[in-house]
Image (cartoon, rainbow, N blue to C red):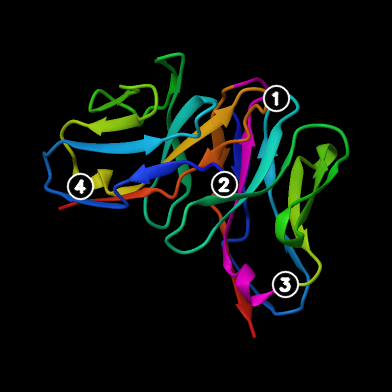
Amino acid sequence: AQSVTQPDIHITVSEGASLELRCNYSYGATPYLFWYVQSPGQGLQLLLKYFSGDTLVQGIKGFEAEFKRSQSSFNLRKPSVHWSDAAEYFCAVGATGGGNKLTFGTGTQLKVEL
Amino acid sequence: EPEVTQTPSHQVTQMGQEVILRCVPISNHLYFYWYRQILGQKVEFLVSFYNNEISEKSEIFDDQFSVERPDGSNFTLKIRSTKLEDSAMYFCASIKMGRENEQFFGPGTRLTVL
């Protein structure tokens, strides 16, 4: 069964500092990997996704993530955090093949100090 | 840009009552999903729906739950007899064929069972 671990429940960074949110997945084949962001009271917005090809993927709002098969990781990074990035971030894994469910991690709550 | 919509945004009901949560997926999408998120917890898969039938469901999706696509545009989740533990945010999502697993999420319906 597929699973996702986000080891950091809360992270606090200063505005302008770099950010890395960790995500480890478990899946028997090549996974589809996603990062979603959720602002308070809002739905889930897709930041970026990895299906295949280049292991460094670029997303919206200046985020990027790197797929490392050897470490079963898909960490999210941003070189300079803005106060508006404060939100909850969810990593998710989807089975290869159409129509399959996403399995989410428990999320990382990001706080940005001004 | 097309988006998934959900109504109502907030539903309050008494324990034992039936509720119907409504979603309008993006018009050319073919797979539909319901997920739920209990306050402070991760997003959990409930059910996927394709070609007018359930393609996969989780253990959470018991006989109290049902889904329907009654008119070719709406996608509904019915809970027959709500329990306190059904209180959660319910998200609808949909996929466009050819973009497997890139799920677009609606803003959610917050269900409160009293």
Q: Secondary structure at mark 4?
A: helix
Q: Label 3, on which residue? A: A81
Q: Is residue A88 above or below residue A95?
A: below
Q: Label 4, on which residue? A: B84
Image point (50%, 30%), residue name:
B27
Q: Label 1, on which residue? A: A28
Q: Amino acid at mark 3?
A: Val
Q: Is residue A108 magenta?
A: no
Marks 1 and 3, Cα distance to the nearest angstrom? 34 Å
The mark tally for this picture is 4
Q: Position of residue A29 (x, y in %)?
A: 73, 24
Of the 4 image quadrants, the one containing the C terminus of chain A is bottom right
Q: Label 2, on which residue? A: A105
* Chain letter, disc 2 residue: A
* Chain letter, disc 4 residue: B
The reply to whether label 1 and label 3 mark residues of one chain is yes
